[in-house]
Structure formats: C-alpha cells, structure tokens
Image (cartoon, helix red, strand yellow):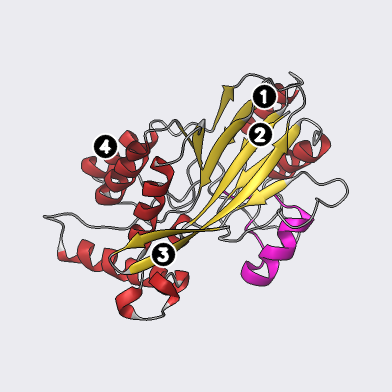
Amino acid sequence: MHMKIHTEKGAVELCEQVTEITVPGLSREYTFVQVTDLHIMCHEEGDSPEAVELAEARKRFWALQAGVFADGIDSEETRIYPVEACELLAEHIRGMDGIDGVFFTGDTVDYPSAANFRRAKRFLKSLGKKCYIVPGNHDAVEGDADDDMKAAFYDLFGDVPEYFAEEMDGFDILGFSDGSISITESQVKFLEERLSLSRPVIILLHAPVFTEVTREKVYPYWGYNWMVGDPGKPEEKQTEAGFRFRDLLCEHRDKVRAVITGHVHLWSGDECPPAEGDVLQYTTNPAFQGCYRIVKIHG
C-alpha cells in the first residue's frame, strides 16, 4: 500500500506493508509499527569540515541507492534525501492512532557520530510512542570514541543489552542484539529460558536468521553471510551459537509467531508461507526509502 505525503517538492509516496500475526487466546488486538534501517546521517553547527564532508557524501550515496522522488519525477529538484524520507515517515507515524509501540530493528544511524545519535534520539522521541529498539551493525561506537559521541550513543541506546523481554497480555516481545550477524551463548540460553515458559513470542532482530524464503531474496542481491545461521558459506561471524539460535526458533515455530527484522533492505516473508521446518520471518525495506511495516497481532 502506498501512502501519499504532500511536501514542498510534491507528493511523496510512503510504502506500507501490513502483516497479520495470529496469537491464539488474545483478549484484544495489538498494533505495532516496524521501522528499520533509517541510516541517519547529518552534521551540526561547529562540526569539522571532515565531518560535514562525510555526512554529505553518505547522504548522496544513500539517496542514489534509494531513488525516492516527489511526484515520481526523477530529477535533482524532486529527490527526497534519506533524512527527509525519515522525517516524513515520522510525521506519518505521529498521526497514527491505536499504535501500541514502534519496533526499531537496527541501523538507526549510518555511521557513529554525536550528531547522528542526537538526530536519531530526536526522531524516536518525536513519535510520542513506546519504542522497542535492537541495534544494528551501524549502531556502534569504538572504545576510542570521544566523550561527546559516547554520551550521545548512551542517550540513544542505553547499555545496549544483548537481549530483552517485554511481557504483553498473552505474548512476549523478545529482542536480540545481533547487528554483527552473530549470536552469543548467553543469547541462546536466554532464548531457551523464554521458550521454556511456553508463551507465544515475537522476535525482534536486526540481521535476519537464515530461512529459505529469506535466502531466495537475499542471495541474489547480497550473497552469503547476511543472515544468522547462514550455512551457505560460514565465516568467522557464523558461530555455533548462531546456528543453535536459528534451530531453536525453527524447532519452536509453534511458539515463535514471527521473527521481524531489517538489515537486508528487502521485503520478504509476505508473498508465501515459510518452507517446511522454517520459522515465519519478515524482513522490511529501509525507512530511508519511506518504507515501514504495520504489525497486527490478534487472536
């Protein structure tokens, strides 16, 4: 579904995918919005020339990748840059009624900088809705980062837990930090513990787990090693814990009602059911292309 937003440049289309997930026995319907891969890049007054140059270069790079234009006219005058697309999306989400929360599934910023983290924080706060955040591979700071960047990062992500659980009335939301396309032993143990409770769960990840449906979309576009537990060409990032994590989700697919992810900048999971033995998984196009997913959970 395409939603039109009118701007000074013309009408811009946001792309909405609606996903219905069944959880038996729910007393009411829940509605969430999934937003992924904003890749926010910006600069602030007082930034160095190098910081400004980087922000402008990355802005141009993703704009050329995204190809978002007002009125569908391909020209520089109608081009919608990534941060512009994200702000239009924020405006649209603010106007939604009956939303129980927003799932942010990683790559909120394009690269680490205090300016980017602060802009991302303003984006999240502006929505006025509860946010469930898992970081992506772009959402990180190195140990030698300056204090300003570290403070802005912490203000956005907090302690960046490896995992979290949010208990709802009739199901749980489980989030895992897998931005480096790897899973830890402690994350596997946590998943095992939560699944042992026999409660239905919705899983939030940045990088998807390997499934046949996702593979069919990802391999032609990206190749190997963009998914957790990818058996195609294991490398160092593919850990035994990652393969067990993926197997657990598939083995307990009766409890795992859906895995919701980003990272690969592609829609998947909407056109056909999962292959036999696979967990149901949805990946979503990036926010910098004006895309988002509505997740309706009902009995």
Task: Give the residue at the far left of this rendering.
Answer: 46
Examine the rendered structure and indicate whether residue 50 appears above or below residue 94: below
Sequence-earlier tag: 2 or 3: 3
Q: Nearer the viewer, mark 4 or mark 1?
A: 1
Sequence-earlier tag: 3 or 4: 3
Q: Quadrant of the C terminus?
A: top right
Q: Point out which mark residue 236 bears.
A: none
Which residue in the protein does label 3 denote? 12
Dot 3 and dot 4 residues touching (CB under 8 Å): no
Instruction: Decide if residue 243 is on the left or right side of residue 70.
Output: right
Q: Position of residue 231 (x, y in %)?
A: 76, 56
Q: Give the residue drawn at x 30%, y 51%.
A: 116
Circle 2 residues within 10 Å: few <14, some 14–19, many ≥20: many
Q: Position of residue 95 (x, y in %)?
A: 40, 42
Sequence-earlier tag: 1 or 2: 1
Question: Residue 193 is drawn in which quadrant?
Answer: top right
Chain part drawn in magenta: 205-226
- Tag 1, which secondary structure? loop
